[in-house]
Image (tube, rainbow, N blue to C red):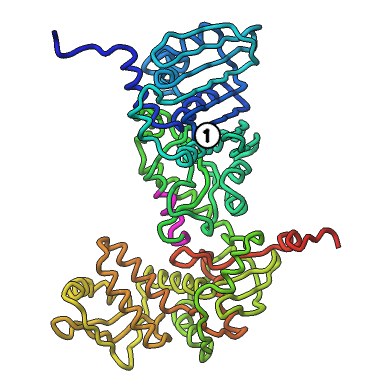
Amino acid sequence: MPEIQILDEHTINQIAAGEVIERPASVVKELVENSLDAGAKNIWIRIEEGGTSLIVVRDDGKGMDRVDAENAFKKHATSKIRVFDDLQNVNTSGFRGEALPSIASISRLRMSTCTKDDNIGTRITIEGENELVIEDLATPQGTKIEVADLFFNTPVRSKYLKRVSTELQHIVKIVTIEAIRRPDVSFTLTHGERKIVDAPESDLKTRIGVLLGNDAAKELIEFKGDSEDFQLRGFLTKPAISRKTTSGLYLHINGRPVQARNICYSIKGAYGSLLHDGHFPLGALFIEIPKNDVDVNVHPAKTIVRIAKEEVVSKKIRVVINETLAEHALIAHVDLSDTKTFTSIATANDKVKPRQLNNIDSFQQEFEVDFHQNDVQETNMPTMRPLALVENKYIVALGLDGVFIIDFHAAHERVMYERLKDQMRFKRIGSQNLLAPISLELSKSETNAFEKRLAEINEMGFEAEKFGPSSFMIRSVPALLAGSEPDRIREAIDDVVESGSMKSAEDRHQHMMYTVACHSALRAGDKLSMAQMEFVIREMESIPNPYACVHGRPTVMTITPDELDKKFKRSGF
């Protein structure tokens, strides 16, 4: 008997099911995509026990006649392509013809369907490897597919399913992806008796708000860009609303939801230091590029694509995002419905003993020497005037658009960073001699790292020289640090030493710039006069991106009169 055997049809289907159907959410994805390809305007999804016991997907699409319904359960039966060349111009979600036979091979499945022109519909029932049972049925136009007891005949697969809550979470994610992709279609998701997603037909911005929450909805910015062989549209949040992962970032290429890690990082890079460290904005972008530049046939689930000119596409995305962010006042709104907002303002961190600054010159002098000779950069920050200082941390200011709350340390840190960036660009970093040089005693590893970086450290405005086998003498510091107290200068130097462990030269350089900016800025606990508060605001107005500190924390938030009216339940007079 030959060792190489041809597998039977049932085994082939179960192998295909292993590629396409990983968990209940995979079933939901395939069935919803079929509904969208059928032209549905309303899709209803009902699941029980996280989709393991029952998944029902019903739509009002064009439906199928008896012959098409029967053919749909044959492997590689599809209405989407005819020949190989059609793969280069696929406009539909699916095209392989594997979904229904794969799902049917590992579940108890029933499908009811009817077209607009038929007086009677068709119902097909199949359990695992059994034959199709086909019968007539009076049913409205569209298709309804019920999948029960998923993996009932593959106990090994069912053993690896997670808790109901976990499987439900994956299903909600899939429905969210499809609903953001098609805001023109109504989506309803019900788990047991609980309605989880209720997204009526809408525009894209409204749909993102419904699915990603009110916080995101209020902070969305529209992005649009057109160039040769490239088009971008969509909405992303202001930097104040972000996540540590890409889970809130929905990307589409030529209308298809995709996973594109490199593009996600290009988007993050375009925001730069406006975002909190390691965070990504929320929202959805739709990118159109030539179909021949995209291979959608890389993965059975069709969520991963290969882009022929990915670097070019990424660069164009960064340009659009950079230009759009520069046009907007990136000020977040205070959420008056969340009591935690004000709690954090009142009690954040331990109370710091107020320190009266000697005078405004202590942090103004470094600017008068070099920078006010240059043209002041335009900003779109609203004009405002200071009213009060809260907890020696926050400036409360009044503008035409409402009340503004400024974290003056974060704001001044951003100002210092932009000044330092200008100095670096024009090779004019100021340096100030210390009255009492600072001696550094380092470990062997720190000594090696510090010595290798002496040149770039000195370029930043420090004057450091080796003074012994493991010691260095710091005789000068950047002018921006000159007005700081000795302990703050020492902290800055210690942070510079720590950056030596970073592998990337670019990361080390950026960390040094952040360090100088952070330690030269005003600190929480500094007791500012009205003139000093006014100075901070004017400095914010003079830089291009005053809306986040170098670590990505917001510098300013606003409360509009309308928001106050709602909170005080005021209508009319």
Q: Position of residue 542 (x, y in %)?
A: 54, 71
Query: Could you say whether the residue bearing mark 1 is in a helix, strand or loop?
Result: helix
Number of callouts = 1
- Left or right, residue 507 beside residue 74: left
Instruction: Work out whether 471 lies above or below 180.
Output: below
Task: Let me know if residue 460 appears in the view.
Answer: yes
Q: Position of residue 489 (x, y in %)?
A: 36, 83
Instruction: Work out whether 109 lies above or below 374.
Output: above
Could you tell me which residue is drawn at 53 percent across and 89 percent down?
356
Q: Which residue is mark 1?
A: 178
The amino acid at mark 1 is: Glu
Magenta region includes residue 274: yes
Could you tell me which residue is drawn at 47 percent across and 70 percent down?
414
Q: Please identify the quadrant where the C terminus is shown.
A: bottom right
Magenta region includes residue 403: no
Residue 54 versus residue 365: which sits nearer the camera?
Answer: 54
Q: Please identify the quadrant where the N terminus is shown.
A: top left
- Left or right, residue 199 beside residue 162: right
Residue 171 versus residue 565: which sits nearer the camera?
Answer: 171
| Quadrant in the rendering for residue 508 | bottom left
Residue 148 versus residue 69: which sits nearer the camera?
Answer: 148
| Quadrant in the rendering for residue 10 | top left
| Span colored in magenta | 265-275
Q: Position of residue 441 (x, y in %)?
A: 21, 83
Could you tell me which residue is drawn at 45 percent across and 69 percent down?
418
Instruction: Work out whether 509 lies above or below 441.
Output: above
Query: Label 1: few (<14), some or many (≥20) within 10 Å?
Result: some
Task: Let me know if residue 92 appears in the view.
Answer: no
Q: Position of residue 447 (x, y in %)?
A: 18, 76
Could you tell me which residue is drawn at 60 percent across and 84 percent down?
531
Mainly helix, strand or loop, the magenta region?
Answer: helix
